[in-house]
């Protein structure tokens, strides 16, 4: 019998998973539902879904896998539907942004025979070299040579863990395991914080008395810096609201770096400023190289750290035990 996966919420991420499952050796049928019904019809017409679903509650009992790619604030009614209509042994993969909130809600609503596993994908490193939004179009190769964070509950059965690892193989991604708290902290750093800083830069620039003239000259550099990224304002607000402690900690780190820049502007020489910017550019290129390699264990480190030094002193590399 052909296995089936049911997708709630049709995004480039979820549709890319759908395509990868359809192309896998298991040959999944992928069914999809979205509150905007035209999305499902368009995805079916494009071959990204095997079937567009209008009444997911009527077909839940036929799906072995369920993927939730919906806003966190909409999660509760979907979990209630799953609790009532899904069959024992259904595996639910969570793609919503706030993992701690989703985990707590799932534990409250779902019966023990439904298995809830969080997913946090890191996309194919080739997408980082593309212009525009990196995952604006669904592709079965979107996760190839990327990473797939797996966030299981402590009581997750071994067969569900094996299925999660098999999902990584079907997507072409390497697995790594983390806790919901770690995932939320990572989301705050790599998704929410850039958008928050972009918003601050947007308002700081537009509030300037010279904006009336400056806006005529603003171009690609400014536009890229003030973009809120791939998430909607509502989704970003929800991510920030549910992870305030993480954002406060990250913002403090940003404030520390801005204070360092204020010191550069007050007392730093041109050479010292240039040296600092060269270090930053080098660290970014080292991270891109590691990301392209995709083998963090072989790299032997999470990424190349920035050299540590006093504000105007000589460079000091971190010691091995630091």
Image (cartoon, grey):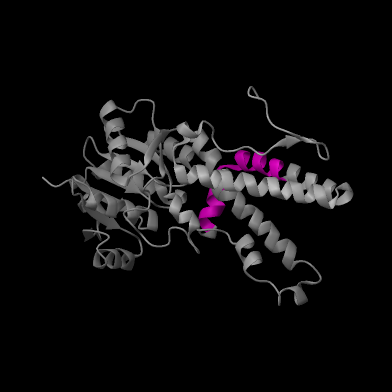
Q: Main secondary structure of the magenta part?
A: helix
Q: Which residue is the extreme one toward the left?
A: 1
Q: Nearer the viewer, residue 286 or 164?
A: 286
Which residue corresponds to the image point at 47% horizontal and 46% vertical from the top-left? Answer: 292
Instruction: Count the marks.
Output: 0
* Of the pair 164 and 276, the residue shown nearer to us: 276
Residue 119 appears left or right of 185: left
Mark yes or no: residue 64 visible: yes
From the viewer's perspective, tell me whether residue 296 is left or right of residue 23: right
- In the picture as drawn, the residue positioned furthest to the right comes out as 267
**Residue extending furthest top?**
321
Q: Is residue 187 left or right of residue 249?
A: left
Chain part drawn in magenta: 234-254
Q: Quadrant of residue 169?
A: top left
Q: Does the magenta segment cover residue 249?
A: yes
Quarter of the image for the C terminus: give it: top right
> Where residue 244 sits: x, y (%)?
61, 42
The part of the image, by quadrant, that contains residue 213 is bottom right
Q: Residue at x 57, y 49 (%)?
A: 192
In the image, residue 203 lies at what x, y percent? 71, 62
List x then y, in percent, for residue 252. 71, 41
Relative vertical location of residue 39 with respect to residue 189 in this rendering, above or below: below
Left or right for 194, reference 129: right
Quarter of the image containing the N terminus?
A: top left
Residue 241 seen in the figure: no
Q: What percent of the width, then of the height, locates residue 300?
A: 51, 31
Is residue 81 magenta-colored?
no
């Amino acid at each position: 019998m052909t296995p089936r996966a049911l997708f709630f919420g049709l995004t480039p991420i979820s549709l890319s998973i759908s395509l990868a499952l359809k192309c896998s050796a298991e040959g999944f049928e992928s069914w999809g539902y979205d509150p905007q019904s035209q999305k499902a019809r368009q995805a079916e017409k494009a071959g990204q879904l095997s079937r567009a679903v209008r009444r997911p509650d009527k077909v839940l009992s036929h799906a072995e896998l369920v993927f939730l790619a919906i806003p966190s604030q909409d999660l509760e009614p979907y979990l209630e539907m799953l609790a009532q209509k899904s069959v024992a042994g259904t595996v639910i993969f969570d793609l919503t942004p706030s993992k701690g909130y989703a985990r707590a809600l799932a534990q409250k609503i779902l019966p023990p025979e439904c298995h809830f596993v969080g997913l946090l994908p890191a996309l194919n490193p080739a997408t980082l070299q593309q212009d525009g939004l990196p995952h604006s179009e669904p592709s079965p190769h979107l996760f190839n040579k990327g990473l797939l964070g797996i966030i299981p509950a402590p009581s997750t059965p071994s067969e569900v863990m094996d299925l999660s690892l098999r999902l990584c193989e079907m997507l072409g991604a390497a697995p790594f395991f983390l806790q919901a708290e770690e995932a939320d902290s990572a989301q705050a750093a790599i998704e929410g914080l850039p958008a928050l800083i972009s918003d601050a830069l947007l308002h700081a620039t537009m509030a300037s008395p010279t904006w009336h003239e400056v806006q005529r000259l603003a171009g690609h550099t400014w536009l890229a810096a003030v973009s809120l990224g791939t998430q909607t304002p509502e989704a970003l607000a929800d991510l920030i609201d549910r992870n305030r402690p993480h954002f406060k900690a990250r913002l403090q780190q940003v404030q520390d770096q801005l204070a360092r820049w204020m010191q550069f502007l007050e007392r730093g020489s041109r050479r010292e400023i240039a040296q600092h910017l060269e270090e930053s550019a080098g660290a970014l290129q080292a991270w891109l190289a590691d990301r392209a390699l995709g083998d963090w264990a072989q790299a032997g480190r999470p990424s190349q750290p920035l050299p540590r030094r006093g504000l105007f002193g000589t460079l000091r590399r971190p010691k091995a035990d630091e």
